[in-house]
Image (spheres, grey):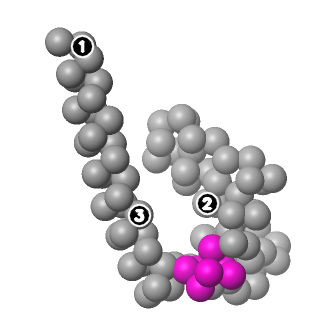
Amino acid sequence: MHGWAISLRLKSISGDVLQVSEGSLYPALHKLEQEGWITAEWKQTENNRRAKFYSLTRLGRKQLESEAANWRRLSSAISYVIQLSEG
């Protein structure tokens, strides 16, 4: 996807909770590209405009899986702590 489509997708799948500004999105995409976790390629959009399209690399998929596992562990621990404080 190109950057604007990524922003819209994040907003959509999060139920409008996550809204990423261009000032945050593009530096993040640039960093992900520098890390080798995504690749970027200039293509034409559906509106016939030139845009950079981003794709997850194999290394990026591995990193995503690792980050997701860490997030599940952290959010589970936080949920456990919150439940303890309620009781």
45 displayed left or right of 75: right
Q: Is residue 68 above or below residue 45?
A: above
Please provide percent x and percent y for residue 58: 44, 87
Task: Give the residue drawn at x 35%, y 58%.
Answer: 70
What residue sits right under mark 3 in the picture?
67
Quadrant of the image containing the N terminus: bottom right
Quadrant of residue 76 within the rendered picture: top left
Mark on residue 6? 2
- Tell me which segment is drawn in magenta: 32-38
Residue 55: quarter of image: bottom right
Mark closest to the chain's N terminus, 2 or 3: 2
Nearer mark to the viewer, of 1 and 3: 1
Of labels 2 and 1, earlier in sequence is 2
Q: Label for residue 20?
A: none
The amino acid type of the residue labelled 2 equals Ile
Residue 59 falls inside the magenta stretch: no
Residue at the farthest left position: 87
Percent x, y of residue 6: 61, 60
In the picture provided, is 58 more to the left or to the right than 73?
Answer: right
Callout 3: 10 Å neighbours few (<14), some, many (20+)?
few
Against 69, is 57 above or below? below
Residue 45 visible in rendering: no
